[in-house]
């Protein structure tokens, strides 16, 4: 009986080593696949002898191709998906690698069959030769750099925006120097001349007009700068009150009708469109007024003949306002920028008409605070129409307010309370009222105003300062109205920076 004996220990060990190596290779493959997917990097190989192309799974993902169902030529697919302007780059790369056998790195754009637009980086830098120096394998990677390119584009935009902002700020500061110095020189210069005893009455009136206009210009300038600073810092709080819109429009019409005459613009006809006999809304009157003043003021500034019209109408849950003029108009390529800070249509416009370039930026910000939007239609040399919307909310206490606002006041030794903490402002108001038969009481704080208003039964009218040291004019008014709902209270506010308008709070 014959037999053989063989020690299988080494075979078993070799089999275990092969199994372990296979498992390790599979782990490495999974890790490589996961790494490629995370980094959005695909790898490729070209077998030179057969010209067969191999792609990793991530290569298919990058190009948006289903690996299981695809049976075409991979090089052809790349060229088909490449952006038309980049095809020459891909063709040059193909020749450099597969014909000239040289390394290359090139960026190009594609659009996948699914419509995704991508930026890719193609790298060929790993060429394997045999013992005779002949090329066996050409390989490299393809990286999806879309996110990087988008960030790069945004950084370029941010850089350009920052550079433009710096340029605008420099231009703004130079312009502000001129805008501030010019009226200040007029105020100081003509105020000094008024001290001369030999100045005639006619000359005095002329110089006083110049000082007044220069002061108003300077005040407008300062207010614009303060407003845009508050808006950008988020300090502006919307305060809704009930107003009768037509009353505001009549007030604006009266002011700008007079303004056109003051500016000797007798060839400009001012029109107002009011669709309803009475129209009560709840809104922030200060912000609404600010938008209208900026738009109508611009129309007056840039219109020398023809007409200016402003009005409003209901459009669903919004109120749509418009300001139309036949002025110089705005070039189409400048229309997008005029709502930005410090922007005017051109430096020529800035030199000819002055201004800060902040008015429309303020108007846009105020419109957005009122949950609306602003836009324009314009033809250069033919005129401009600005439109803006605000949220429509009906006024709840309109009738009561309307009755108070229209109450007649007779100047017959009546008692008036003037709430004003600033001495110069009080001197100005008391000087105006000194021409009438009136008795005045002055207060300098909100609480003092409340106490004096409630302690004088014969009080007929309150002139209320909006900002006082302890309470706002609004807060003081609300407290007074609790006890004296019929007492007329007039806010000392601004329209064109100089007028008194009825208080809307109750």
Image: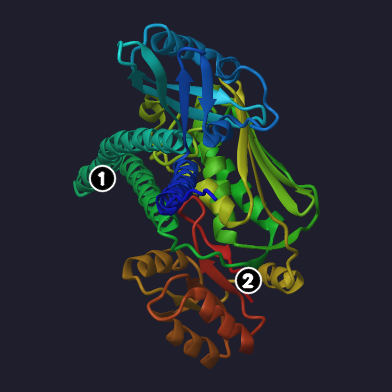
273 versus 288 height, above or below: above
Task: Count the marks.
Answer: 2
441 versus 370 height, above or below: below
Q: Provide residue 410's location: percent of width, then percent of height.
A: 62, 71
Mark 2, secondary structure of its residue: loop
26 versus 501 height, above or below: above
Tell me if I can see residue 295 in this picture: yes
Judging by the rendered image, the residue that carries numbered circle 2 is 409
* N-term-proximal mark, 2 vs 1: 1
Judging by the rendered image, the residue that carries numbered circle 1 is 184
Mark 1, secondary structure of its residue: helix
Residue under the point 54% across and 53% down: 366
Q: Provide residue 400's location: percent of width, then percent of height.
A: 73, 74
Q: Would residue 287 be found to the left or right of residue 181 on screen?
A: right
Q: Quadrant of the C terminus?
A: bottom right
Alpha carbon distance from label 2 to label 1:
38 Å
């Amino acid at each position: 009986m014959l037999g053989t004996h063989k020690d299988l220990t080494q075979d078993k060990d070799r089999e275990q080593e092969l199994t372990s190596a296979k498992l390790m290779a599979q782990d490495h493959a999974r890790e490589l696949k996961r790494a490629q997917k995370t980094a959005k990097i695909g790898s490729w190989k070209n077998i030179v002898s057969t010209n067969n192309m191999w792609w990793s799974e991530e290569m298919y993902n990058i190009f948006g191709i289903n690996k299981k169902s695809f049976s075409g030529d991979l090089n052809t697919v790349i060229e088909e998906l490449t952006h038309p302007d980049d095809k020459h780059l891909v063709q040059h790369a193909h020749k450099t690698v597969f014909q000239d056998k040289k390394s290359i790195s090139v960026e190009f754009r594609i659009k996948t069959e699914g419509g995704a637009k991508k930026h890719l980086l193609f790298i060929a830098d790993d060429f394997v030769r045999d013992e005779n120096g002949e090329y066996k394998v050409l390989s490299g990677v393809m990286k999806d750099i879309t996110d990087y390119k988008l960030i790069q584009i945004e950084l370029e935009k941010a850089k350009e925006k920052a550079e433009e902002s710096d340029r605008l700020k420099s231009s703004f500061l130079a312009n502000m120097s001129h805008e501030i110095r010019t009226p200040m020189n007029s105020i100081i210069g003509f105020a000094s001349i008024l001290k001369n005893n030999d100045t005639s009455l006619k000359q005095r009136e002329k110089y006083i007009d110049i000082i007044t206009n220069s002061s108003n210009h300077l005040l407008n300038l300062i207010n614009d700068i303060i407003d845009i600073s508050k808006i950008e810092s988020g300090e502006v709080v919307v305060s809704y009150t009930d107003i009768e819109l037509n009353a505001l429009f009549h007030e604006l019409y009266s002011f700008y009708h007079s303004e056109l005459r003051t500016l000797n613009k007798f060839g400009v006809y001012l029109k107002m469109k009011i669709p309803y006999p009475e129209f009560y809304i709840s809104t922030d009157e200060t912000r609404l007024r600010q938008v209208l003043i900026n738009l109508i003021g611009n129309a007056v500034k840039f219109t020398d003949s023809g007409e200016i019209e402003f009005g409003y109408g209901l459009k669903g849950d919004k109120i749509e306002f418009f300001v139309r003029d036949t002025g110089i108009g705005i070039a189409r390529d400048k229309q997008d920028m005029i709502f930005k800070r410090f922007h005017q249509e051109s430096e020529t416009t800035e030199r000819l008409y002055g201004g800060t370039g902040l008015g429309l930026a303020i108007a846009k910000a105020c419109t957005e605070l009122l949950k609306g939007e602003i836009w324009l239609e314009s033809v250069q040399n033919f005129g401009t129409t600005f439109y803006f919307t605000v949220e429509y909310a009906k006024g709840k206490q309109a009738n009561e307010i309307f009755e108070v606002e229209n109450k007649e006041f007779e100047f017959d030794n009546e008692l008036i309370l003037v709430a004003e903490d600033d001495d110069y402002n009080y001197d100005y108001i008391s000087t105006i009222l000194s021409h009438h038969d009136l008795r005045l009481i002055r207060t300098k704080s909100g609480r003092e105003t409340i106490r004096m208003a409630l302690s004088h039964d014969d009080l007929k009218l309150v002139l209320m300062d909006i900002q006082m040291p302890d309470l706002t004019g609004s807060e003081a008014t609300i407290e007074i109205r609790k006890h004296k709902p019929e007492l007329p209270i007039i806010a000392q506010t601004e329209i064109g920076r100089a007028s008194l308008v009825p208080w809307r709070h109750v």
